[in-house]
Every structure is written in C-alpha cells, then in structure tokens.
Amino acid sequence: MKAQSKLYFYIMLSTVLLLFLAVWSLNTGVYDFGDKSAFEVLWKVIRGDSDLSLSDKYIVWEVRASRIVMAIIIGSMLSVSGTSLQGLFRNPLATGDLIGLTAGATLMAAITIVLGGHFREYLPEVVQFSLVGIAAFTGSLLAMLLVYKISTSGGKTNVVMMLLTGVAISAIGFSITGFLIYISKDEQLRDLTFWNMGSLAAATWTKNIILAVILTVSYFILLPKGKALNAMMLGERDAQHLGINVEKLKKQIVIIVSLMVGSCVAFSGTIGFVGLIVPYILRLLFKSNYNFILPLSAILGSVLLLTADTVSRSVVEPSELPIGILTAMMGAPIFIAILLKFKKSV
Amino acid sequence: MKKFILAASVLMAVYSCQKEVQKPTENKTEVSSETPKSNNKIVTLNGGITEIVAALGHEKEIVATDVTSTYPESLKTTAENLGHVRSITIEPIMAVSPTLILGSDKDINPELMEKIKASGIKTETFKQEYTVEGTKKLIADVAKAIGNTDYQKLNDKIDADLKQIQPIAKKPKVLFIYARGNMMMVAGKNTPMAALINLAGGENAVNDFEDFKPLTPEAVVKANPDVLFFFSSGLQSSGGNEGALKMPGVSQTNAGKNKKIIAMDGGLVSGFGPRLGEAAVSLNKLLVESTK
C-alpha cells in the first residue's frame, strides 16, 4: 500500500510539472497578442467572447493549444509504447524502431510524398491533406502484421525471431526509402527530410480527437499490465507458471503498440528517442518495476515531448527546429548524466 | 533524494529557457510598429513572386518572405525572413498579421496549405511555368491579385531585354550543377536552368531526364559540356573554379579542358520573374564570352 501512495505522489508531481510546461508553452511563440496575454485570449475563447480578433483566437486555439495537446498525447504514446515493448522483450533497446514499425511507416510515407503526385488529385480533399498520415499508419500496421506472421508458429511468438524480422523489415523499408530519395525531386526531398525529423506543426483538433481515442483505448488495456510485465522479467516460462497468459500478452502489446506508433508517425513524422529515453530514465530511478514505470512513462513522455516542441518553435524564431533533433539533443545529455550517476549501482 | 534533484534541475532548465524565449518577442513588437501603413500586408513565399510584387511598386507592403526571396535586397531590412518554404509553419506567418499570402502551388506543402486555409487569410497560389509566356502570365496574375493592373511595362521590359540576346552560331552545351558543398545535382529537362540556358542561346547538356539528378562522373563525361554553369553561392561553396575543375569527371570534358566555368546569382537564374530578360541577357553574354 505504501508503494501505491508513493506512485500517486510521483504521478501528481509529474502532472504538476506537465501543467506548468503547458502554461509556459501556451505563452511561447512569435505571434504577438498586443496588450493581452495568451491566457486572457484563451479564457475569452473558452467563454466565447465576441470581441476577440479572429487571428488571436486562431493562434491560441487552433495553433498553440492544439499543438500542446498533440505533444502531450504523442509524447505519452511513444513513451508508453517503448516501455511496453521493452518489458515484453526484456530488452532496454526495444522500441517501435527496432521491430520495424517506424521503417514501415516511413516507407509508406515516402512512397506517398514521392509518388503521390500521380494519384493525389483523384482523391477527396480531406484525404489529400492527410494522405501521408494515412499511408504511414498503414505502413506501420503492415510491418507489424509481417513481423508477427514471420515470428509466430503454432500460436507461439518467438521474441528473438521477432527482433530479427524487425531488423530485416527495417533494412527493406529504409533501402526502398533510399531509392525513393534518389528519384525524388528537390521539394519532395525536403519534405522527406523534414518528415524524417518529425514536426507537430500540422496539429489540429480533429487529429487530436483521433489520437485521444486511440490513447484511451490503448491505455485501458496496457496500463494495468504492470504486474504481467514484472512477471515477464523472470522469463516466459516462469511468467506462465505465475498465471500470465504470455501469448495473449504478446499479441495485445504488439498490436496496441503498432497502433500507437503508427498513428503517432502518421500525424507527426518520425520522432525518435522518446520511447527509449523516458523508460530508461524511469528504469534507473525505479528499477524495472513496471507497476511504477508504465503509468509514469505515460506522463513523463508528455513532459519530454512538450518541452522539446516548445523549445523547437522558439529557439530559431521565426523558423522552427525539427523536433526529432531536439528530442535527441535533450535526451542524450540526461541519459549520459544518469548513466554516470548510476554507473556503480548498475 | 536523487529524484528530487532531477526534478528540480528539469524545472530550472525549463525556467531558464523561458527567460531566453521571451526576449525576441519583445523585440518583435518594436519592429512591427515600424511597418508601413498601407492597404495590404503581403507575405510572399516565392522568389519570383516577391520580385513581381516589388517591381509593381508594392515592395513596402511585403511584410515577410521565404528564403528564396533575395531580391530586391532592401527587403532584408523591411520584411521578415521566414526561412525555407517547406519548413515554414503557420504561427510566424500569422505573427506578421498579413492580409494576403502569395505563393506558387508547387512550393507550399499540403500541411501548411491546410493551416493557411483554416486561418482565413486571403491566399493566392500561382502556377509557375519556366517560359517567357509563363512568366508574363504570372506577372499578370500576381498584379491582379494585389490589385494593380499597371503591369504591361514589366512584360515590355522582358521583351526589350530579350531582343539584346546575341545569337550564338554553335550552341554551347551547358551543364548546370547545383552544388552545396559536397552535394551536387545536375539540371535536366523542365528546370528553370534548362529553360534559361535555351533562352540565352545555349543548349542544356543533359536532356534524358527531368528535374535534378545527382552528379555522377560517367554522366558528366557522357554529357561532355562546353561550359559548366553554377549559382555563385554554389560555386563558392564547392571551392570556386579550382574546386569545380576537380569534380569527378569534369577534367575529361570540353568545359574542364578549356576551363570554361560561369556563375550567376541563384535568385536571378531561377526566379523567372520580371528580371527574366535581364537574366537571359547576362547568361547570353557569359556564353558568348566563353565560346570565343
């Protein structure tokens, strides 16, 4: 029971930190509200004040608030997906990247960016705008299905096979993407580059609602899995003896993770490092107790990505730094610092 | 305890970032109070279109541009540079509170276009064709968009300039190399460079592909150009004439053997705006000299 109240304390603490960050983020940006602060504008938007200028409203609500929410959701999902995969594979390096999900998503996105010109005009306008996103999601799902098919025989999934298949799929995905880069035009090449470095600039409330639904469904199934993942650390056979349905657990985690990674890549491009760094830090702090690190990674992932995004849109004003660069830049020093600090105890 | 130290250090880092971030915003307000009083506040997202707006006498109405809008140079001080059009986001555009956004349909990516549409700012996108007729049409279209019908003089100037082009008896084969340090691409068919080379009395050296392709030694030797053509900035970034002559395959070509290397300002070459005639005449002069 004591551990439980400790967990609630940390959850509270990190939620307060997240709220503080959201407030800071809302007030950060190149747009100038004149004598009003961003909060006053937001308050007016919420109250439906009519004397508000359309631009002010648009910036606060459609641009900044929607982007903050997207950073929170995507950061959280990337982080939880990393934590779950690492628990499942008992490997601190397992992320969506490693089992080929990101490669699949990137490949499909690249195909759409480079070859989309040939069929884009025949599609309805709503689909045209989100074509790359839809393609990325499909790519991630296809990669997952392929990995799962190859590594499963007789209803049992071989984890080593799964990781190796992931490596192979990544190799195929990136080589075809490489070919597409070779044949792409100048502006397509730039789109591909920016896509590969990730961005939350395209955030809208519609996308946030879709992401929020995916998040809710996924967390409803994933977050109570802490105990099962703790048991998995003892090895699959021992976990089985402890009454865990290992095959079902594997299936659930892999499907949900590919759903989460696919939708994240679909809306924001590839943002690396979040799924690796957050669980790693948490594991160093709380050992591998998934009862703790699974719910906490959901919040700290948001903290990391929201910080990164806010910095990304304010350091090189009026332009923007791709967020993937920042997640790596911010994550790596913390990573090293903690490694050094815990060098002796690890 | 360690956890608290970590949490505290994160908080402090966030705090210090916040202070840094606020400074530029304060500066911005001063700049925006100096912007000229006029009906339009225009954001142009294409070098050629920027030139047309400026040439029509509306330079002071341009409040922000993209990175390719390098001419007229005075814009550097009067308009905000938003960076490369493929990485521009909506907030910096809105920050200059424009009344009109002008861009080419090829430049603006779908995500930004979606945001621009949602913002409700009046936006016009134009199709840019790399021909004399296409340029004249673009000038007419842009003029219409900004409410200025007095554009004929710009088109007349293009015609007048083009008349100065001297015919070159033996058309030199010109290879355009887009160089940025180690990355090199050559211009094929349907590129602004190929179009300008043809206008200026030369012949584009590679016609078996469209757009740009990475430069390979074999392709250079096969194309065997008489002249190598660079952007001034590109030539500089790859080590000037010396550097160009050392590029793989170049020494085997006529251009390499005779050291015929020319360079022009990138904005002038690729703009296809009101200075099209000027650009063609400059290139024509360089080609005439190099064929002597």
Image: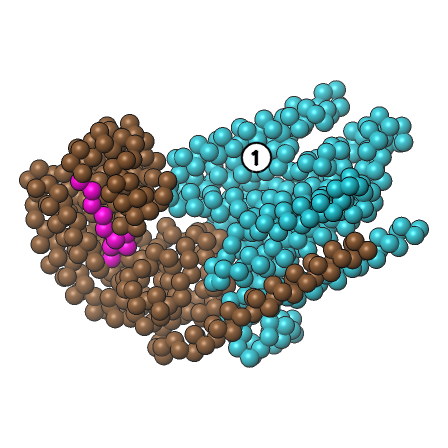
Chain colours: A cyan, B brown
Whether residue A18 is situated above or below residue A136 in the rendered picture: below
Tell me, yes or no, whether the highlighted magenta stretch contains residue A283: no
Binning the other alpha carbons within 10 Å of mark 1 as few (below 14), some (14 to 19) or many (20 upward) gives: many
Coordinates of residue A213 in the picture (x, y in percent): 69, 50
Tell me, yes or no, whether the highlighted magenta stretch contains residue B267: yes
Q: Amino acid at mark 1?
A: Gly
The image quarter containing residue A226 is top right
Q: Which residue is mark 1?
A: A104
Query: Image point 36% across, 73% down: which residue?
Result: B40
Whether residue B144 is situated above or below residue B171 in the rendered picture: below
Could you say whether the residue bearing mark 1 is in a helix, strand or loop? helix
Whether residue B287 is situated above or below residue B85 in the rendered picture: above
Coordinates of residue B8 in the picture (x, y in percent): 73, 60
Coordinates of residue B95 in the picture (x, y in percent): 48, 68
Q: Would residue A221 be found to the left or right of residue A58 on screen?
A: right
Q: Is residue B120 visible?
A: no
Q: Quadrant of the C terminus of chain A?
A: top right
Query: Image point 24% across, 61% down: which residue?
Result: B140
Query: Image point 28% across, 35% down: which residue?
Result: B246
Q: Would residue B192 be found to the left or right of residue B1 on screen?
A: left
Q: Is residue A299 visible?
A: yes
Query: Image point 17% across, 49% down: which residue?
Result: B283
Give the residue furthest to the right.
Answer: A1
Coordinates of residue B57 in the picture (x, y in percent): 25, 71
Give the residue furthest to the front.
Answer: A344
Find the magenta span and give its range: B260-273
Which residue is at the front of the view, B258 or A228? B258
Chain letter for the residue marked with disc 1 in the picture: A
Count of marks overlaid on the render? 1
